Image (cartoon, rainbow, N blue to C red):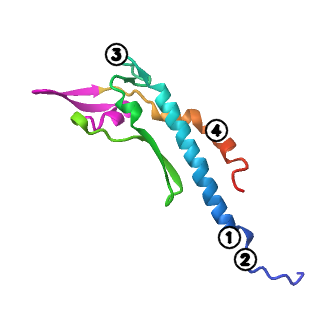
Amino acid sequence: MSGIKITRLFFDSPTVLGAVDKATRKVFSRFGAFVRRSARGSIRKRKASSAPGQPPSSHTGLLKRFIFFSYEPSRKSVVIGPMRLTENNRGDAPSALEYGGTVMLDRGKDNTKVTVRPRPYMGPAFEKEKATLPALWRDSVK
């Protein structure tokens, strides 16, 4: 040995850790924005319902408007998806559209349960944008 004593590793320095945290926040926030944009773009405004397996149609525009993303610093991850809609018992509609399920429709005096076949929009948007992650990470830590 040459008699060199290592007291601190380079990758443990606060400067490096801060740069990595900043890059992680920036990359994941951009990725969240890309997935949100892709999901919103897949939802078409039309009167007719979409076919099962295709992205849902937008009749009121609520689903399209309420897709958000947020970077979660404690987990160093990004959460992307529709906000829970509570108006007129539509709270489970975004989930039912993505995965299929049963929702209650409020039709005045008559409340009806409707089974919805899956019309995924978030999963395909994520898969489409997943390929951009390596390019987003390239040269991100400065």
Helix, strand or loop under label 4: loop
Single out the mark in the foreground, 4 or 3: 3
Name the amino acid type tagged 3.
Answer: Lys
Label 1 – label 4 distance at C-alpha: 28 Å
Q: Residue furthest left?
A: 109
Magenta segment boundaries in residue numbering:
90-115
Q: Relative to 38, does residue 71 appear above or below in the rendering? A: below
Q: Which residue is mark 1?
A: 12
Label 3 – label 2 distance at C-alpha: 64 Å
Q: Which residue is mark 2?
A: 8
* N-term-proximal mark, 3 vs 2: 2
The circle drawn on residue 47 is 3
| Residues tagged 1 and 2 counted as in contact (Cβ below 8 A) | yes
The circle drawn on residue 132 is 4
* N-term-proximal mark, 4 vs 3: 3
Q: Residue furthest right?
A: 2
Q: Relative to 30, does residue 105 appear above or below in the rendering? A: above
Q: State the image coordinates of residue 46 (x, y, percent, origin top left).
A: 38, 17
